[in-house]
């Protein structure tokens, strides 16, 4: 089986694959655990890129229109936003230096 490129996975997540390609991709990732794991990793990267404004305008629009349409996905996006807030807070204390 040929390797599925990351860009195809991203297109799947943003709903830009043709219906035939989408069905073929879905059939493949249901059978291939490695592909499913890559899908999950790229999905997390896509959410992170969205939260940190690293998507192009067209990708952001596709994300808003097609990806963030379910309550589960919106919850994952909100969790990423919260993580960004916590890790970006200048008042956040650094971990203490270890005792020698």
Image (cartoon, grey):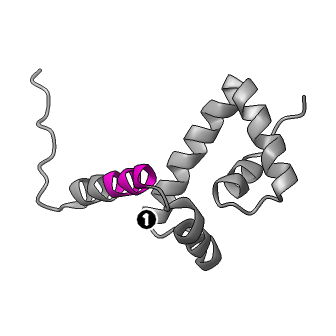
Give the residue displayed 48% in from the left and 55% down from the top: 47
Question: Dot 1 lies on which element?
Answer: loop
Position above or below: 60 against 13: below
Residue 59 placement (x, y as % from top left): 62, 70
- Is residue 18 in the magenta section? no
- The magenta segment: 71-80
Name, please, the residue furthest toward the top: 100
Q: Which one is nearer the viewer's eye here, 90 or 64?
A: 64
Is 92 displayed left or right of 32 in the figure? Answer: left
Residue 3 placement (x, y as % from top left): 84, 35
Is 87 displayed left or right of 66 in the figure? Answer: left
Position above or below: 54 against 35: below
Give the residue displayed 42% in from the left and 63% down from the top: 51
Residue 10 placement (x, y as % from top left): 68, 54
In the picture of the structure, the residue carrying the numbered disc 1 is 52
Q: Which one is nearer the viewer's eye here, 97 or 74?
A: 74
Q: Quadrant of residue 74?
A: bottom left
Q: Quadrant of residue 24?
A: top right
């Amino acid at each position: 089986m040929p390797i599925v490129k990351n860009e195809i996975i991203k297109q799947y997540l943003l709903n830009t694959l043709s219906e035939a390609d989408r069905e073929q991709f879905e059939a493949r990732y249901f059978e291939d655990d490695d592909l499913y794991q890559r899908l999950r990793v790229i999905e997390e990267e896509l959410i992170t890129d969205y939260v940190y404004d690293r998507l192009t305008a067209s990708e952001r629009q596709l994300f808003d229109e097609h990806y963030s349409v379910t309550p589960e996905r919106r919850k994952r996006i909100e969790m990423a936003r919260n993580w960004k807030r916590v890790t970006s807070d200048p008042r956040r204390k650094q971990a203490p230096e270890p005792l020698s």
